[in-house]
Image: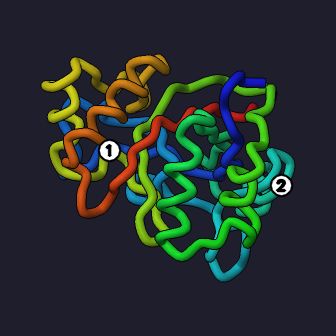
């Protein structure tokens, strides 16, 4: 288990190429993200209302059933200290914590499991009206964070270490630069499920 991390769930996502509107310091190919602002996601339900899988097995089955090349299963976790702020934003966005999926797992503090996975790094994300935004999709935040904290994305567009990621998320929260889209930023731990 990853100490101090709650499981958000699993995403089935593509890797992405950097777009013209994204910060030029990001890698040009192979960007990893949990945000559909950057990557394509495979939904859990046919209506596309939920794209958080409860288990790696469900996510792998959906990936295989989709039959598209380049899909990866990501395990996503959040520091337990960040869970109350995330749940507050999720509730404000109209997603009931008893409705199942992501909010229920976070509310129950399901532990981030030890899985056969490659730990990829941390992504700064926030919830807004049913969507997860990443700091790489909101104009200028990558450069602002780097100037203020020295933290910048590394390989795959992720922050390699937890301490730097949490410092950058705190600076974004204190600065208010993500408003009005995101009020609470958190460092999501991403792992590639083998």
Q: Give the percent coordinates (x, y) of residue 194.
A: 75, 31
Residue visible at 64% across and 44% down in the picture: 72
In the picture, residue 78 is in which quadrant?
top right
Q: Secondary structure at mark 2?
A: helix
Residue 44: numbered disc? none
Front position among marks 1 and 2: 1
Residue 21 position (above or below residue 109): below
Q: How is the image coloured?
A: rainbow
Q: Give the percent coordinates (x, y) of residue 107.
A: 70, 53
Q: CA distance from mark 1 to mark 2?
A: 28 Å
Quadrant the N terminus occupies: top right
Residue that numbered label 2 is attached to: 58
Residue that numbered label 1 is attached to: 135
Q: Can you see residue 125?
A: yes
Q: Secondary structure at mark 1?
A: loop
Residue 161 position (above or below residue 66): above
Residue visible at 33% across and 56% down in the picture: 182
Q: Give the percent coordinates (x, y) of residue 33.
A: 48, 44
């Amino acid at each position: 288990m990853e100490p101090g991390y709650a499981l958000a769930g699993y995403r089935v996502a593509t890797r992405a190429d950097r777009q013209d509107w994204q910060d030029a310091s990001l890698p040009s190919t192979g960007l990893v993200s949990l945000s559909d602002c950057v990557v394509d996601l495979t939904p859990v339900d046919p209506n596309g209302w939920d794209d958080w899988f409860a288990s790696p097995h469900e996510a792998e089955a959906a990936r295989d059933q989709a039959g598209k090349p380049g899909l990866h299963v990501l395990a996503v976790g959040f520091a337990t200290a960040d869970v109350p702020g995330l749940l507050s934003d999720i509730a404000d966005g109209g997603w009931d914590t008893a409705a199942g999926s992501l909010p229920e797992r976070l509310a129950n503090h399901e532990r981030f499991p030890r899985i056969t996975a490659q730990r990829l790094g941390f992504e700064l994300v926030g919830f807004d009206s049913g969507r997860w935004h990443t700091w790489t999709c909101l104009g200028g935040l990558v450069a602002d964070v780097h100037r203020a904290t020295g933290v910048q994305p590394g390989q795959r567009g992720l922050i390699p270490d937890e301490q730097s990621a949490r410092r950058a998320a705190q600076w974004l929260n204190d600065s208010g630069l993500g408003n009005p889209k995101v009020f609470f930023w958190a460092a999501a731990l991403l792992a590639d499920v083998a």
